[in-house]
Image (cartoon, coloured by chain):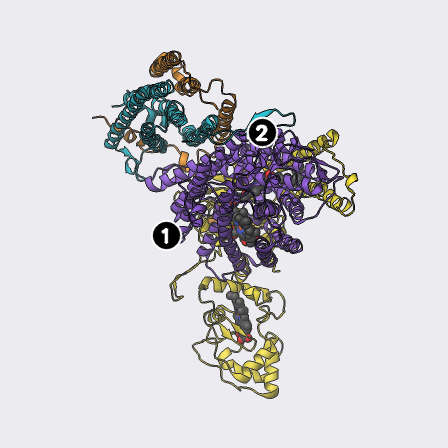
Amino acid sequence: MAHAYVPEIAVDREGNEHIVQGWQDDFYGGKLGFWLFMLTEVMMFGGMFLALAYYNTLHPQEFLEASASLNRLLGGTNTVILLVSALTMGLGLLKMRAGDVKGAKLMIWATILLATIFLVIKGFEWSAEYHHGIFLMHGEMLPESTMAFGKKLFFGMYFTMTGLHGVHIIIGIGLMLWLLKRINANKVNPQHYILYFNIALYWDIVHLIWVFVFPYYYMMGAATGGTSGH
Amino acid sequence: MSKTYFDETHCAIGHPKSTFMQWMLTIDHKRIGIMYAAVMFTFFFVAVATAFLMRLELFAPGQQYIDGNTFNQAFTLHGVIMIFLFIVPGIPAIFGNIVMPLMIGAKDVSFPRLNWFTFWLYILGCIIAISSLWVGNGFADTGWTFYAPYSLTTGTNVIFTLVAAFVLGMASILTGLNFLVTIHRLRAPGMTFFKMPLFVWGIYATAWIQLLATPVVGITLILAIMEKYFGIGIFDPAKGGDPVLFEHLFWIYSHPAVYLMILPAFGIMSEIIPVFSRREIFGYRTIALSSASIAGIGYLVWGHHLYTSGMADIAKTVFSFLTFFVAIPTGIKFYDWIATMYKGKIVLATPMLWALGTIITFAIGGLTGVTIAMIGVDIHLQDTYYTVAHFHYAMLGGVVFLLFAGLHYWFPLVTGRMYNEPRAKIAFYLNFIGFNLLWFPMFIAGYLGMPRRYFDYLPEFQIYHQASFIGAVIFIAGLVYMFYVLIQGWVKGPKVGVNPWRATTLEWHLPSSPPPLENHSKVPYVDFDPYEYYHGEPVVKFDENMRRID
Amino acid sequence: MGIKTTVNYQEEKAVYFKVLAGLLLLTAITFIQPHLFMAQSTFMAQMLIAVIKAWLIVMYYMHLKGEKLIGAMVIFALLLVLVFFVIVIGIDVSHFQFKGESYITEPITTGVTQSATPTHH
Amino acid sequence: MSNSLQGFDVRAATFAADVEQAFWVNFWISIVLFLSVVAPMIYFAWKYNANKVKNEDVENVTHNTALEIAWTLIPTAMLMVLFYYGYTSMQVLRTMPAESESIVVKVEGLKWQWRYEYPANANGHIHKIGGAFQKPKIDDKGKVIEKGTMGITALYVPVNTNVILEMSAPKNDVIHSFFVPAFRMKEDVVPGRTTKQWFNATEVGEYDIECAEYCGTDHSYMYSRLVVLPQKEYDAWFNSAEDTPKGNFTKTGDALLQRHGCTQCHSILTDEMKIGPSLKTRLSKEQVLHVIEKGQNKLGYDMGAMPAGLATGTDAQEIAAYVAGGLKGEKPASFAACTACHGEDGRGMGGLSPDLVGYDATLLGHVFKNGKEGMIGRMPAFPEIPEDEISAIAKYLENIGK
Ligand code: HEA
Ligand code: HEA
Ligand code: CUA
Ligand SMILES: [Cu+2]
């Protein structure tokens, strides 16, 4: 918004003045809108968890066994990485609000770096699984394989959900790069930072999803013996 | 003459000179609403054509004009267009856009650019849906419900249809989001939630459904697409999946979706009834809160579509029990409307005729809904024409009729002109008679055991199908006539000024008709109820600065 | 409206680090939980921890504290998901009819179990 | 309407009455509720019409607590009554009898037929009745590549006995739904799951089985029949190795006539002449006279044409009356002119020429293949109807003549 928006005034019968909220420059509106958007993400992943729980109820034992065979070390590392990235993102926003644009940019770059590391680790994990014959349209996951249904479903959902989560990470990286561009163009600055605020919210929800994905897939079967993966 | 929103607009990008580009890039909520209407109108004709084709084919048993597979594609196309392209976005996208901001005294919606984007997302979805008629192996033949595993195994172009439904779902979510923020943020000063017009309440409740239910069907469609491309067996029994899960996930959205259709329609009803009874509405708060409770309870009853699916018997019982509770707030609304007519001064103008007609047709649609909410009875009636008649009475005789009511009611607001009243009434009667002749016989056929989605049928049912066909002809004639009357009104109807109905809500207190680009010249302070009449005349009056003078 | 220009930088930063510490601690507990407590119901324990983590993130990182309206909306959405779970999982699937006779749930036959766990090398 | 498709408005299973009762309770409550809304609406629209009411008389009534409570609680109570009836009728439908006291039949629904498998009988024989209606496969030119079948087979059950259906679909098939309107029962057949329903038929007869879950191209032809037999006949069949019970359970032919749309032009149970002749009686006097006079070569018998003018005047009259009367009574001498081709009994000598008494399979086959241009009008050809359907129709027509 290049030119400042001057809100209108409505006058009631007693002559009192009331500010009229316009759609321009509505920080709270922007925040509300983004929260509502995040609720749709909650419902979406909620739907997937529902499907997951559905089959978990039908095949409890096989789910435990399949979970035990995931690599908890890599999964755990990724958990910590996301944790830290949520911090850098938050600190960046804080710096921006305090007027430290340079520091904010640094923090965004740090977040991008962490996000990339997350993806690389995920890549290692998936390729290891591929080599063990468990991957979409491959090996044990093919229709003709005799792997138990419970396990097939577990891994099918695992690839779908972590895959979709990965897509969210990639979108997040894209958003952060765009944010950097906007900061450089001074469209996002210590006075107008709603975009930054919302992208930070987005990053938190990406993290939040992982907070549930991780224990459901990796930790559920931890007690049923099985060392942490390979 | 002052400039109206037809003369100038704000654009998403730059300041294009050509009128065409100004329309393409417009972010003005009124223009976007009109464009939605134009597009939906076009698609609706495709859907009506397929509906008529089906009726023609069903005129007699055996094959007449099209073969079985074409018939299957025809009802899928009909269902998909009617649901995803027309009735789900329908009233919110058209009237939610055009009048909702006017009603709350806003200059536009909260995110006008998002609104523009949403419109084009909607168009993209339409294009994907329609293009599958020519791309790939023909349009999907799954029915609009896409039940797995049929949708996963059929050779037709289901992917396109699924993607289209997903994109349209996105558009629906974003519309809902936009409206929610608008209603929360941009109400005129003084307008509390219980001073909002009831149409806004309808849109508000609807927006919550759009926002929270649509993602579930979104993810269901994604899972189906994943399944089709990556072979994970989430719904495919050959790989251990359970088709019933698909039905759950599908109806978790699609049942709330029917309330998403009807709630804004009820909102239109609540606008029209007091205006044409020329008195204050009865039980404002109960009507407002019943919208909210229909939306809320509506989330809990999806299982009434699964009575014969193999779901656990105890779940059927729970769902049946819950389903009856949606009928109660609906009933309350109905009684409130009727009570509003008591000791009023009832003007039977065309919008009121449509509204009263709908009370009859939707009562039939809703009460037959209650019939099939009874488990034992639904086990007999599920997937028969009884169900088909139920939902046409609800959707066509409820939602579409009220959309027409709104079309007549807000016609002078949008165009600044008036249609020919006697002719519009003739159109209504044609429609009303045709509609009942079209769908009532189907209750009987369904009760006698005529299953739906049947290309061919046993000859006993012929008589009902024939009656229905005649109804369809009358109905469609009525429709064409109605649109003729409306278009004629727009082109050369008399100019009628800003408030021809002498209504009270804010959208009728604009500086010009049609309204100017940024709506109200000054935003009023709202310290009055939405329907304040005294002795048959509106109470609230404003001076040119939108200060109350009564 | 709504633009806050003054930030108590140090104070908010301290909150961020405190929450991070809490989250790291909870993550650590996640790992030792199966050996520590509720080993019989790992799943419940894990979800409990996840909920606490989520609560921390939502309240402090996402600044939901004090946001009445948005907080109510979030709770509404979460309740809805909960209801879906109760109905679908609690009422329907857990009463799956004719389970033993159904193909998708029939007990696994011949030695499939071994082949499913990836072999180590 | 013909007798065998009465199924729908008939209750033929023990629980049909419960469902029926629930429906009618609902019906009357609905009427009450409907009127409670629509009657005052119409009355108000008339009473308070704008041209009757003066502005001063308009009153803003916006609340009436008693009324509001009434129209919340009374409908709620009514709805709970409905829930109760819906629930109890469902309970009867869904409470399976003990397997020891019932016959358990396995039902398989697949694209697009129903298959039934019975438990082994006393001789260890297992009845497997395969398939229902299956359309023939036809190439572009209308030639039949693969014959279709109309399940002359059906699900045979004894009357007054519990029957449990254990239903499943092949795992790579789609969902179907086993629907018997006359019994008011329906349950989906879901691949991957086993579902069950049960019934106890109360009346001997034949009933329709339809598929009520959309399953693709021939969804509307996934049709079969449920034949309820007297206990004795059922036992006799069940303990034999026959596929179908002995006796006359061939009303299938009727279903076929209906399904192919024959009844549009032909009446079957009465003598009424519609577009085509009634199929109850074979030939009318006029038709016979017409053929005798003009000859005929329309049916495509190997024998070739029937020459014109084999008989004239009163001879012709006499023959026509005799033939139209079904060759009953005394045979006129002049009929000798016909016996060379149509045989002494007029039955067409095993297919050499048209049967004059009944519609045998050969005649039907010819008519279906070639259509027929006659004195009344033109009957279109139905080349796709397979042989076993033709014989089913012939058998059926033969029986109704008696
Ligand atoms: C606008 C759309 C719309 C609306 C509003 C409704 C409203 C209702 N519907 Fe309907 N329904 C559909 C659209 C709709 N439906 C569609 C599209 C399908 C089929 C989808 C498919 O399979 O393809 C369907 C299918 C459907 C089924 C599943 C049928 C089956 O497949 O076996 C059921 C079962 O319970 C049902 C019930 C109800 C009920 C109880 C209501 C209630 O909300 C009705 C409430 C209304 C009233 C009760 C009437 C008005 C009130 C009075 C007159 C006052 C007095 C009355 C009382 C207080 C009771 N509907
Ligand atoms: C909104 C929903 C809607 C509407 C309006 C209609 C309208 C009609 N439908 Fe409907 N129909 C469905 C939704 C709808 N249908 C659905 C969901 C199914 C199930 C599909 C499936 O099984 O998968 C179905 C199935 C269905 C069948 C059953 C197929 C089968 O099971 O074998 C038949 C059969 O005749 C039929 C016929 C008709 C006819 C003759 C009309 C006529 O009334 C047509 C006349 C049209 C209108 C009255 C529309 C008016 C709208 C406008 C004029 C728009 C104006 C626009 C603007 C102003 C922007 N429909
Ligand atoms: Cu089988 Cu429809
Ligand atoms: Cu529903």
The chain containing the residue under callout 2 comes to A
Q: Nearer the viewer, residue D138 or D66?
A: D66
Chain painted in cyan in the figure: A
**Rendered image: mark on residue D133:** none
| Left or right position of D307 against A85 | right
**Are the two marked residues, 1 and 2, in contact with CB atoms closer than 8 angstroms?**
no
Mark in front: 1 vs 2: 2
Which chain is depicted yellow?
A: D
Residue type, numbered disc 1: Val
| Secondary structure of the residue carrying numbered label 2 | strand
Location of residue D152 with respect to D169 vertically, above or below: below
Would you name the residue on which mark 2 appears?
A10
Q: Which residue corresponds to mark 1? A: B135
In the rendered image of this protein, which colour is used for chain C? Answer: orange
The answer, for residue B393, to whether it is visible in the render is: no
Badge 2: how crowded within 10 Å, few (<14), some, or many (20+)? many
Residue A86's x, y, as percent? 35, 21
**Cα gap from disc 1 to disc 2, whole angstroms:** 55 Å
* Tag 1 subunit: B
Q: Are marks 1 and 2 on the same chain?
A: no
Residue displayed at 61% across by 24% down: A16
Out of D153 and A209, give the one closest to the viewer. A209
Q: Is residue A54 left or right of residue B373?
A: left
Q: Is residue B143 shown left or right of residue B549?
A: left
Pinpoint residue D73: horizontal percent, then vertical percent.
69, 31
Image: D401 above or below B263: below
Which color was chain B given?
A: purple
